[in-house]
Image (cartoon, coloured by chain):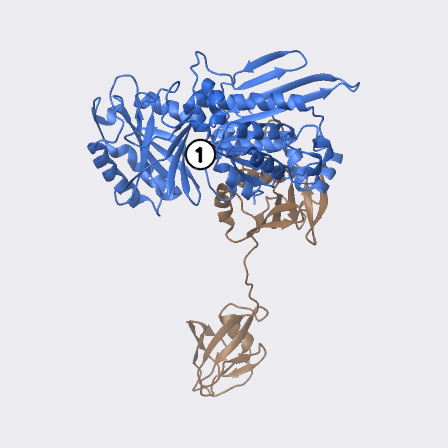
Amino acid sequence: MKTRLRIAGVHMDALRSHLLPGDGKEAVAFAVCGRLGGPEVTWLLVQRIIPVPYADCVIRRHDIVTWNTDVLVPLLGEIRTTGASLVKFHSHPTDWNDFSRSDDASDVSVFDTVHLWSRRAVPHASVVVMGNGSLFGRTVGPHGDFAALDRIAVAGMSVEFHDIPPGSAALVDRSTGHRSAVPEFSASSAQVLGPATVALLGKLRIGIVGCSGTGSKVVLELARNGVGSLVLVDPDVVEERNLNRIEGSVREDCGRAKVDVLSNAVARMGLGTDVVTVQRYLASAEAVRTLATCDWVFGCMDSHDGRRTLNRLASFYVIPYVDVGVSITPDGFGSIESAVAAAHFVEPGGSSLASRGAISADVANAEALMLANPEEYGRQRRAGYVEGVAGPRPAVGPFNSLAANLGVIELLDRVHRLRRTTRAAETLRLDITNSFILPERHADACDALGRVLGLGDIDPLLDMPSVT
Amino acid sequence: MQSLTNSQGTEHGDQKHSRFPITVDSSKYVVERPTILGSEILALAKRQSKDYLLTQLMAEGPPRVIEPDHSVNLREPGIERFVTLKRQQTDGRERREFTLPARDLVVLAQFGERWETVREGADRWLRISDWPVPCGYRQTVVTLGLLVPPSYPNQGFDMAYFDPPLERSDGKPINAVTPRPCAGRSFQQWSRHRLPTDPWRPDVDGVGTELLRVTEFVRVEVER
């Protein structure tokens, strides 16, 4: 059983500032974690950070920290009640890239107690934060047995994937050499992004929800960039009116499931991307469970309700989320009043689509009702309780392509770890009518989704009775 | 031990044997006359014949059912042990056809087993039996229904449904109520919506806060 860890950017920032305050000395912190379970991999999902105050550290030096365990006591009670996992973090300011013998002794001792308090076999882990920014870690079993974490993902303004086991954090120069060769079809990309990023794409699993005009373009673009595996979610079949924009579709595909059409198109490329198709609505157990295992999700839906649910999923499972779409207002005379393509980068624990005003709760509620109970929706609309939900929307292929590409560029930009002198914008709006790009920043985190960060698998899924 | 005094004279029997100890369920009583009716034995155990059967344990064979108007002769040799049996039992649990978030289950625990989650067509209902009605109404407890919207808890509860319908003690009509048929019953629908000053907060509000809100608007109605 492999174990991985996901940390939201806001928590990683708190960890880094506590563990590496700049005084060159080690420090310790804990995290309470939810979980995502799977047949081969278990993910630990950070819900909150509990730092061990410096005052509680009897000794703090560059190579050792001795700390009082009082801060752990209330956490033991909590994990016994809730069944949560505990992760211990400590720092190696001098970039020692492995666990030391005293690290081993401390982990064995602390986690022996933690396991005795856990009610059943629950995984717990120990992670080192290095001064150079790298992370590595291991699970600590009830018998003091260690197993390396095979991925630590940080979903912040930059998205980091630390796949390096303890002891092997060779400092790899990302711009030039890399141990593994890139496939020939990615050679041109590697000249821009570097072999490390190209190799990383091959190890990612990416979910795309909504596989129509915009989604299809995202899917095929990712496949051409050598992404390791894709999860496609869309309940619909191809109709004639979709043929103007579903990339990879042919006339004979009318009546076939959109996810199957795209899966075939990816297979025909022969570039090695695996595809999992889910021909269900997002708010279904199969879609939620499959998407939760993704390292990244794209939302390519028109509906506010779908985007609200995907944002919720991304917070529950600590996954970076890029939402793309086009908003078109035709002027009724054969032209457009406005057309804006937008890409939203949504980091778990940050601002949400709702808190940015990109989706409306009232519209989302009306859409959910219309889907679940059309009669009741009709009744409430006539009684004036809900607004009318838009029917089939106008769509123009090239506008969708713009939005799709803005989204894929967001992914490349944020995993490539380009240096940035200013904090990147969360939203990019490309105003087609007026020919300009407008970046927007959204500093305030969403309180509502902040409450569900890292909850992971619970019953009902996403805490929503309708997800079955 | 309790005594039954000689209030209904039937037989004037042997004065020498005037104390007859009997056992009903697990309690002992002394009967001070030789005969006693089935209904009187039940009354000793504070039970009524409409709700309970009375059986007499026999030395051999199965227990004998004692009808309420049957007169038991306590002078006959035998085991004077009686056991009551409730006439009707209800088995089966309330329905749980979908799962609510954990914090709602914590709130519902106060109602024990007396709540259910039911799917009816495309609707999801939470129904709580024996919901206590605030003062000012003829009913003291009713079934309260709440409709669980498809995107709960992103979208919250709205309106409340009562069966039987609530009636004010003073007989005045209630504002903004309409009958709503559901599952062969008729619920009284109260159109009481949240105002923008009191919006539904996903993951903060839940069954707990909604029960408070419903109690409040029902209470406020009789103060108009």
Where's residue A155, x and y in %?
A: 44, 27
Where's residue B48, x and y in %?
A: 56, 69
SS type, badge 1: loop
Rendered brown, the chain in question is: B
Query: Which quadrant of the view contains residue A37?
Result: top left
Q: In the rendered view, does B186 fall on the left or right side of A408? A: right
Q: In the rendered view, does A24 fall on the left or right side of A446? A: left
Q: In the rendered view, does B26 fall on the left or right side of B212? A: left
Q: In the rendered view, does A423 fall on the left or right side of B90? A: left
Q: Please say if B162 is above or below A53.
A: below
Query: Which quadrant of the view contains residue A253?
Result: top right
Where's residue A2, x and y in %?
A: 37, 40
Q: Is residue A347 visible?
A: no
Image point (45%, 21%), residue name: A190
Q: Which residue is mark 1?
A: A454
Q: Nearer the viewer, residue B200 or B139?
A: B200
Q: Is residue A363 visible?
A: yes
